[in-house]
Image (spheres, grey):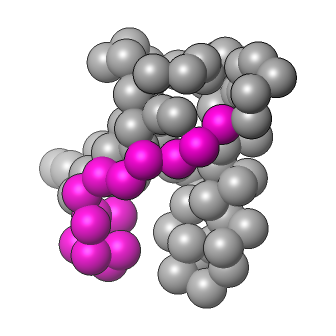
Amino acid sequence: MISVLYFARFRERLGRDRETVELPDDGALTVQSVLDFLVSRGGLWQELLDCDRGVLVAVNQEMANRETVVRQGDELAVFPPVTGG
């Protein structure tokens, strides 16, 4: 299993700051496959985490891309792009 942490508006809109996600026993997944799993829940999950919306991700506190491998015990942090002026 992996820990998924939500930050900023994701945390506010989803009403949670973290959850545990079970991974298949047959090895590793990518960041993209974890995001696809979350988006497959539909509704608000799809609206917020659709990759076309610029979701940023870190694995074990290191910025990651969609092809980064996620393994059992990893921590995946999901947050919106930083904006400001």
Front residue of 38/58: it is 38
Q: Residue at x 72, y 19 (%)?
A: 28
Q: Residue at x 64, y 48 (%)?
A: 35
Q: How many marks?
A: 0
Front residue of 77/23: it is 23
Q: Residue at x 35, y 74 (%)?
A: 14
Q: Position of residue 49 (x, y in %)?
A: 56, 61
Q: Residue at x 52, y 34 (%)?
A: 1
**In this view, 56 is above or below 58:** below
State which quadrant residue 61 falls in.
top left
Front residue of 27/32: it is 27
Q: Position of residue 46 (x, y in %)?
A: 63, 72
Q: Which residues are magenta?
A: 10-23
| 48 left or right of 60 in image | right
Residue 43 is inside the magenta segment:
no
Q: Is residue 65 visible?
A: yes
Q: Is residue 81 visible?
A: no
Q: Position of residue 65 (x, y in %)?
A: 61, 23
Residue 18 is inside the magenta segment:
yes
| 76 left or right of 5 in image | right
State which quadrant residue 37 falls in.
bottom right
Front residue of 65/39: it is 39
